[in-house]
Every structure is written in structure tokens, then in C-alpha cells.
Image (cartoon, rainbow, N blue to C red):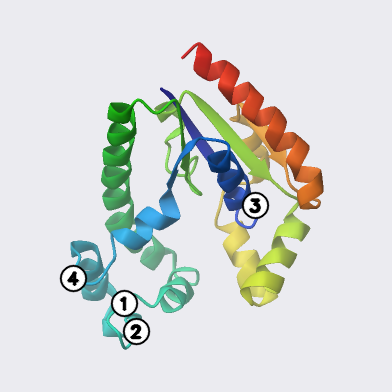
Amino acid sequence: MLYVGLTGSIASGKSTVSSALAARGATLIDSDQLAREVVEPDSAGLAAIVERFGGEVLQHDGTLDRAAVRHRIFSDPAARDALNAIVHPAVRALRARRVEEARARGDRIVIADIPLLFELGLQQTFDAIIVVDASESIRRDRLVGTRGLGVAEAQAMINSQWPTERKRAGATWVIDNNGSLDDLSPQIASLWQALEARADTA
């Protein structure tokens, strides 16, 4: 089994690339989805978050108000660290379980989409790493235009992550996503060929 980490800075287009690779046959383990699962109602993760941040981070239906939490942590590094200490270990354990399930099934190419792969020091976990990148100005515009964030909040989210240069230096493959889907498609096709070749020797 070829186990590949996929990462990139916020709003670089990681989900677009990971979805395209999944459509070609890769098994995708999406960290954002795992992070939602570990804070579902009645979970230990959600209970720990409420204990730390209070009931105002819950919506009326008892689910986590992710926007409220995001607002809290990006203006308070200590709060961000506290949230990470709750969520990251739970996500890591769930990801490991999904990887072992994929290995038991005999899946050939498994891709873990992890936004903070480098920040969490997970580089050595993988056989190879894909970094999806885009210029800072484009990523900021995407955050403002598609997520409705203010410019200052968008910049704060960008600044909270590693610079893209450090991520690119640790990549096996880099996908540049500054343009359209038409610009991206040939890069994904080439990447898939490289993944299949690497899987043949894994």
C-alpha cells in the first residue's frame, strides 16, 4: 500500500485535488471529515471542547458552532493550542484506524488530506507527500470571496500556518493551483501517473 500525505496552505485547493485523485481510484482519508466526526454530539471530543470554551460554542441543536470556535481560536493562540490538544489526538487515532482498514482491504493508494501535516510534524508518517499551493493573494481572495471572511481574518488564518516555501521544500510533488480547473487537470493527470508508478514499487 502506498500511503501519501496531501497538504497545502489554507484555500490552496487541497480538496479539489484530493477529490480528483479519489475519483481516479485513490482511497481518501479527509482530516476535516475526521475532525467533524470526533466532535459529533455526545462525543468525548465535544464534551471536552464545551468544558474548555463554554456552552456558547454550541448551536441550538447541540452541534459544534464551528464559526464561533474559529473566531475564538484565531484571536487567541492559547485557545487554539487548547482546541488542538483536544481534537488532534482524536483525529490521529481515527485516521490510524481508517488506514489499517484500508490496508486490510488491500487498497493500493491511500491519500490522507491533512491541512496541518507539516505543522503537526507528520512528515515521516508517509511514503510521499503532495503539496497543493497557490499564491498568498489568491488564497486570501478565495477566503474572502468564498467563505465570507474579512480581509484581516483571512490574513490571520494564512499567517497561522507554515509559509508555503517550507511546505514545498518537504514535498515529493507540488501542484500549483493559481488558475482554473482546466489549468489544474493536466497536473492531476500527471500526478496520478506518478502515484501509480510509485505504488508499483511500494
Q: Quadrant of residue 140?
A: bottom right
Q: Which residue is mark 4?
A: 42
Q: Which residue is mark 1?
A: 63
- Indicate the secondary structure of the residue bearing disc 4: loop
Q: Residue furthest bottom?
A: 60
Q: Tell me where residue 103 appears, x and y as whole percent.
A: 32, 28
Q: Tell me where residue 45 appears, x and y as whole percent.
A: 24, 63
- Distance from the alpha carbon under mark 2 to that under mark 4: 14 Å
Q: Tell me where residue 114 appears, x and y as whole percent.
A: 47, 45
**How many dots with numbers?**
4
- Distance from the alpha carbon under mark 4 to that under mark 1: 9 Å
- Indicate the secondary structure of the residue bearing disc 2: loop
Q: Tell me where residue 25 appears, x and y as whole percent.
A: 52, 35
- Distance from the alpha carbon under mark 1 to that under mark 3: 27 Å
Up the image or down, 198 lies above or below 68; here it is above
Say which residue appears at 66% left-offset and 30% top-offset.
Answer: 191
Residue in front for this viewpoint, 57 or 166? 57
- Distance from the alpha carbon under mark 2 to that under mark 1: 5 Å
Label number found at residue 17 = none
- Distance from the alpha carbon under mark 3 to that under mark 4: 32 Å
Can I make out residue 142 in this image?
yes
Up the image or down, 183 lies above or below 108; here it is below
Residue in front for this viewpoint, 97 or 82? 97
Counting residues from the N terminus, which is met first, the one under dot 2 or under dot 3? 3
Residue type, numbered disc 2: Gln
- Determine whether, in the image, residue 139 is placed left or right of residue 82: right
Counting residues from the N terminus, which is met first, the one under dot 3 or under dot 4? 3
Q: Which residue is mark 2?
A: 59
Q: Residues within 10 Å of mark 1 (few under 14, many from 20)?
A: some
Q: Residues within 10 Å of mark 3 (few under 14, many from 20)?
A: many
- Indicate the secondary structure of the residue bearing disc 3: loop
Up the image or down, 65 lies above or below 139; here it is below
